Image (tube, helix red, strand yellow):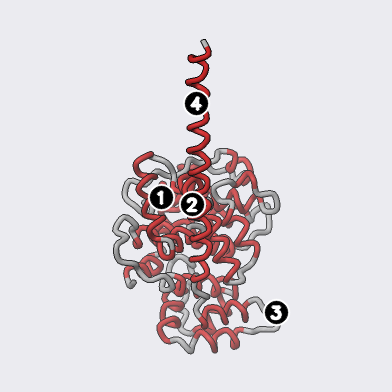
């Protein structure tokens, strides 16, 4: 009997030692990644200045237009996006000033963010498993889905459509940062996620000690963007844990889910996190998933200029 009892105890000790070693390895990886993340780039100068001006209550349309117009390529992209069917403006917008007056500061902010953010992280050789175009497509679709959901939510609660769009656009940006600045570690994460058939964020937490959602929050902090963006972005995989902005967290979670249904992720064969069903109850939109997907499909047809940004990079 003593010998029989000893074997399970030895197995438990060996398992415990293995867990300690694994935890130490995760700590080392975490510390290295945090150190490497110091390289996260700042927001492009013009985009950052536009954000600053838009957030200044003393600013006017001329102030914003002056800075956007300094960048010819950015001006062209903003006007093309502003004239897309996505915004449904019945007449042609021919100047940045007109775009600001007609669409408003917050929409211009999201247009500048859309046109700028895609150029910040250049493609890195050797990461064939990470599909940049699929990643940006998912990000834009999530942004559009978030804006659509916010429009429905606004019928009973004050919510900013463009904050929702930007949160959807940036919700997964941490994947790109990890791919860029912790590429070896992230290659292992992606490989294991595919082998185990698990969502990336679960494997990230186990292997790296943090998730792409947390890294996305770090970027929002570094870019000094509103807390209204950071909270739903960092909690988009755990929306029920968000106490300050539960509806926005549920909204970004659902937008991410709809975007997954509409397209792909950052790697072929990726397993997506399941929908937290309680989000439908939190938002109380009165629309089922089929109707939301039908509405999103129409929006995606109207948003071609946004997807042309991906093709141009």
Please provide percent x and percent y for residue 6: 51, 19
Q: Earlier in the sequence, mark 1 or mark 3?
A: 3
Point out residue 100 in the picture as x, y percentages from the top left corner.
Answer: 56, 79
Q: Residue placed at 59% from the left, 64% from the top?
A: 163
Crowd around label 2: few <14 · some 14–19 · many ≥20 (10 Å): many
Residue at x 48%, y 44% (from the top left corner): 22
Judged from the image, the secondary structure of the residue bearing numbered disc 3 is loop
Residue at which label 3 appears = 57
Do residues under tags 3 and 2 come within 8 Å of each other at their CB atoms? no
Mark 1–mark 4 CB contact (< 8 Å): no
Name the residue that disc number 4 marks. Answer: 10
Q: Which residue is mark 1?
A: 189
Dot in front, 3 or 4 = 4
Which dot, 1 or 3, sits closer to the camera?
A: 1
Between discs 3 and 2, the one toward the N terminus: 3
| Sequence-wise first label, 4 or 2 | 4
Q: Secondary structure at mark 2?
A: helix
Depth check, front residue: 118 or 297: 118
Near mark 4 (Cα within 10 A), the count class, few <14, some 14-19 or many ≥20, is: few
> 41 or 146: nearer the eye?
41
- Element class at badge 1: helix
Percent position of residue 263, x then y: 37, 51
Between marks 1 and 3, how big is the CA–CA gap?
Answer: 44 Å
Q: Quadrant of residue 137?
A: bottom left
User: Residue at 46% across / 74% down in the picture?
Assistant: 116
Q: Give the CA separation, mark 3 to mark 4.
A: 67 Å
Residue 267 horizontal side relative to residue 62, left or right: left
Cα separation, mark 4 vs mark 2, equals 28 Å
Instruction: Give the residue pinned by disc 2.
Output: 208
């Amino acid at each position: 009997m003593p010998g029989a009892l000893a074997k399970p105890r030895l197995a438990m000790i060996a398992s415990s030692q293995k867990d300690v070693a694994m935890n130490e390895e995760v700590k080392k990886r975490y510390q290295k990644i945090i150190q490497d993340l110091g390289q996260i780039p700042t927001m492009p100068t013009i985009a950052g200045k536009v954000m600053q001006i838009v957030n200044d209550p003393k600013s006017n349309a001329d102030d914003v237009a002056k800075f956007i117009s300094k960048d010819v390529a950015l001006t062209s992209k903003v006007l093309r996006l502003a004239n897309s069917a996505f915004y449904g403006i019945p007449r042609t917008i021919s100047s940045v000033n007109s775009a600001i007056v007609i669409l408003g500061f917050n929409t211009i902010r999201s247009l500048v963010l859309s046109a700028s953010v895609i150029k910040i992280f250049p493609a890195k050789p050797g990461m064939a498993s990470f599909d940049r175009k699929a990643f940006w497509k998912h990000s834009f679709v999530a942004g559009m889905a978030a804006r659509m959901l916010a429009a429905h939510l606004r019928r009973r609660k004050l919510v900013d459509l463009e904050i929702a769009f930007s949160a959807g656009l940036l919700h997964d940006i941490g994947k790109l940062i990890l791919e860029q600045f912790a590429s070896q570690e992230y290659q292992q994460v992606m490989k294991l996620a595919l082998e185990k058939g698990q969502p990336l964020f679960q494997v990230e937490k186990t292997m790296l000690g943090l998730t792409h959602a947390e890294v996305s929050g770090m970027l929002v902090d570094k870019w000094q963007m509103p807390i209204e963006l950071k909270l739903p972005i960092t909690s988009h995989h755990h929306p029920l844990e968000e106490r300050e902005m539960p509806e926005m967290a549920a909204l970004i979670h659902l937008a991410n889910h709809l975007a997954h249904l509409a397209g792909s992720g950052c790697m072929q064969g990726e397993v997506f996190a399941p929908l937290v069903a309680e989000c439908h109850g939190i938002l109380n939109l009165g629309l089922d998933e089929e109707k939301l997907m039908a509405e999103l499909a129409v929006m995606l047809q109207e948003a071609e200029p946004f997807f042309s940004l991906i093709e141009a990079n």
